[in-house]
Image: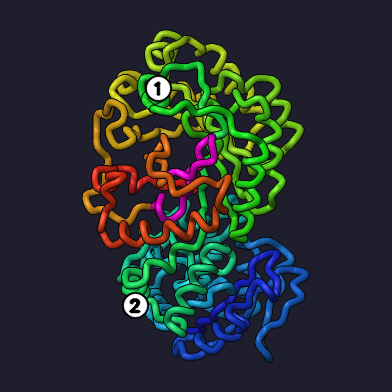
Amino acid sequence: MKVDAVIYVDDGCTEDNLMFRGAFVPDEMWKRLSSVRALNEIVFAIPHGYAGKLPEGAKSFTRNERDDTSFWKRLFSETGAEHVVRIPADSPFLDASIVNEMIDLHLKYLSEYTYSENLPQGFSCEIMGRELVESIPQSLEKMLPLGEVVRSNINQFDVELFYKEPDIRDTRISFRLSNPRDRRIMENIAEMTGDIPPYAKIRDILNSNPGVLFVGPSYVEIEITGRCELDCVFCHRTKLKNEHGDMDTALFRKICADLGAFSLPYSICLGGSGEPMMHDRFYEIMEIALSDRLCANLIVETNGIYAGANFKNFLLDRNDGRIKVIANINGLDGETYRLLHGKDYFDVVHQNICSLRDALPDTGSLYVQIMKINETEPFLDRYYDFWEKAKIPIVLQKQNTFCGLIEDRRYSDLSPLDRVPCWHLQRDLTVLADGAVAFCRQDADGVHARGNVKETSLRELWNDSLNAFLQDYKGDYRRNPDCASCDEWYTFNL
């Protein structure tokens, strides 16, 4: 029975993208896979126009078509393989012993498709049989990639799920070079250990050296104004001791420049205690953020009152897929809206949101958000029906009491039983309107601020917060602020 490995080079990938610590990753993968006893041949699938090198003597297949069923049918036909092991070419941490185990499982049960859900990308593979590729219904052939076709129609195929300890899904790391943040983490691990460790040791390495995960901010919430004309029952704005004004555009520009110094993609959320569109230079701020190629997402959290024709025209003119809009509308009609938001703007907000649907047609660019609290529970089902008919996705938001600053209105507690290290201390930054970098989002008034970006670079402030992250990772929770009583540790942003 012929089993081949296909090292798959993604579209747009260059030779430089496949370098890791001075070594060409496909060379290293070739050597490791050569030890897998069940493999007959190792070949490369490369995109049309790939000009990078491959291991000397390697056999390659150029993809003129996309990663769909037609390509895999051609590859099976030309290689004569009965089973193909697909592995991304940007996987410097690939563990050949895992590939060997997965092949054994696949062949033992004569599976059509074998994959793993708990192993991170870059450590595992997916295995497909000739029968699988030949049995894909014609109606599904153009869906991409092949693995998604199978997983989306999993009951139609003979699928084997491979599981292996340790389970590190909670770290959300992909061990592939295509993600710059994950590349940085892998570089830290390799530098710390002096080598590329086997998968069995990864959990212990992370637990013993959590600092390798602390590479730079991924999600930055920037409060460009503290002004808002609503008086929402669940909002912390009226409980703040200090007045939060408007952020100067020069300060916002400095924040973006400081973020660029990390050389990692990041997402900006215009949020905080106020309504961002009330800032007099809101559109200039948007342009400043979008001018940086490292800004992967620009999220506008809005009450929707000012998201009218001007905003729609800006979105249409900019036509930038990085812009995401989250509109907070906690009501099903004027009366329920007024009870929760203090004033009745339901019709205005509803009209604006539906209008934005035309300016942001891509799925994942526009959301409505509702708080999961006692006051919304009676009409939550009808709310879902209402917005699903409008074809606008819904974010069901957990209430944040800001460590007891506001009344707890939740009717259920969704906190996991076992506490994991705080995602926000590892990946997030919160910058208040005056430039204060809060300890975290819970520090909404900046009482425990790390410093001020007016005086100190974000890199310095980020590096100075490493110890707080390490303490939290080890379960030694801060008292000021009171991290032990916080229940936001498991919530996750981009």
In the displayed structure image, the side of residue 319 where residue 105 appears, left or right = left
- Residue 363 visible, this angle: no
Q: Residues in magenta? A: 423-438
Relative depth, front residue between 402 and 197: 402
What residue do we see at 64% from left, 33% from top? 360
Q: Residues within 10 Å of mark 2 (few under 14, many from 20)?
A: some
Quarter occupied by residue 154: bottom left
List x then y, in percent, for residue 393.
50, 33
Residue located 78% across and 70% down the image: 49
The residue depicted at 34 percent of the width and 21 percent of the height is 376
Q: Nearer the viewer, residue 298 or 90?
A: 298
Q: Position of residue 176 (x, y in %)?
A: 53, 68
**Which dot marks residue 238?**
1
Dot placed on the residue nearer the N-terminal end, 2 or 1:
2
Instruction: Reply yes or no: does residue 141 show up in magenta.
Output: no
**Residue type at tag 1:** Thr
Q: Residue 285, located in which quarter of the rendered image? A: top right
| Residue furthest out toward the left | 417
Is residue 427 located in the magenta-colored stretch of the structure?
Answer: yes
Residues at discs 2 and 1 in contact (Cβ within 8 Å): no
Residue type at mark 2 is: Ala
| Placement of 397 over or under 91, stated as above or below | above
Disc number for residue 200: 2
Q: Is residue 442 left or right of residue 328?
A: left
Of tags 2 and 1, the one toward the viewer is 1
On the image, which quarter does residue 311 sit in? top right
Residues packed near mark 1 inside 10 Å, few (<14), some (14 to 19) or many (20 plus):
few
* Residue 380 coordinates in the image, percent (x, y): 36, 23
Tell me the SS state at disc 2.
Answer: helix
